Amino acid sequence: VLPPPVIHIESYSEDSISFSLKMATNIKVTGYVVNIYWTFDTHRQEKRTLIIDGEKSIQKVANLTAHTPYEISAWAKTELGDSPLSFVHVVTSGTRPASPSLKAKAINQTAVECSWTGPRNVVYGIFYATSYLELYRSPHNTTTTSHNITVFVQRDEQYLFLV
């Protein structure tokens, strides 16, 4: 029976997490699959996937948000198949940035100008959908480093926007 990999948090900061992966077995490990999950404003769960080659690994994940809970899950790929999943949870240090103040204004029937306030030199995600359920499950989205963007939508629909 394959054991799950051991995920050890080596360190964390306001915008990164470093962790190591290892297996407590003599079975040859060919790599790991790691998923990092976090929830954006309780509406949308985000995920980043890492494919890692090799037996032992120390990884650093950057461009994270301060004071945000993250879940790291991993499984090992071995010569005998995939291992069970293991999980760890960590909260980045620092102070979470204030939520941006969003304004959305229709330019015409298919274009909406979105603008917001917030810190510079960060990446913003803009999520939009025609219902709360769609906003939670599968919204349209785009990213930008600016404080405004024009979003193109379907005519004759009402949309919800989140930045």
Image (cartoon, rainbow, N blue to C red):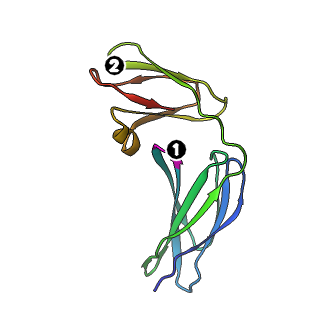
Above or below, 14 against 159 in this view is below
Q: Depth check: 98 or 87 in front? A: 98
Q: Which mark is residue 40?
A: 1
Q: Quadrant of residue 108?
A: top left
Q: Residues within 10 Å of mark 1 (few under 14, many from 20)?
A: some
- Which residue is pictured at 67% across the width and 45% down the height? 66
The type of residue carrying mark 1 is Phe
* Residue 85, position as x, y percentages in the image: 48, 71
Would residue 116 be counted in the magenta stretch?
A: no
Magenta segment's dominant SS is: loop
- Which residue is pictured at 67% across the width and 59% down the height? 18
Above or below, 9 against 80 in this view is above
Element under disc 1: strand
Element under disc 2: loop
- Which residue is pictured at 51% across the width and 73% down the height? 30
Quadrant including the N terminus: bottom left
Q: Which mark is residue 155?
A: none
Q: Residues within 10 Å of mark 2 (few under 14, many from 20)?
A: few
What span is colored magenta in the figure?
39-43
* Residue 53, position as x, y percentages in the image: 54, 66
Residue position for label 2: 110
The type of residue carrying mark 2 is Thr
* Residue 5, position as x, y percentages in the image: 55, 74
Q: Are marks 2 and 1 in contact (CB under 8 Å)?
A: no
Q: Quadrant of residue 120?
A: top right
Query: Label 2 to label 1, Cα distance in Å?
Result: 26 Å
* Residue 35, position as x, y percentages in the image: 51, 59
Outermost residue on the left side: it is 156
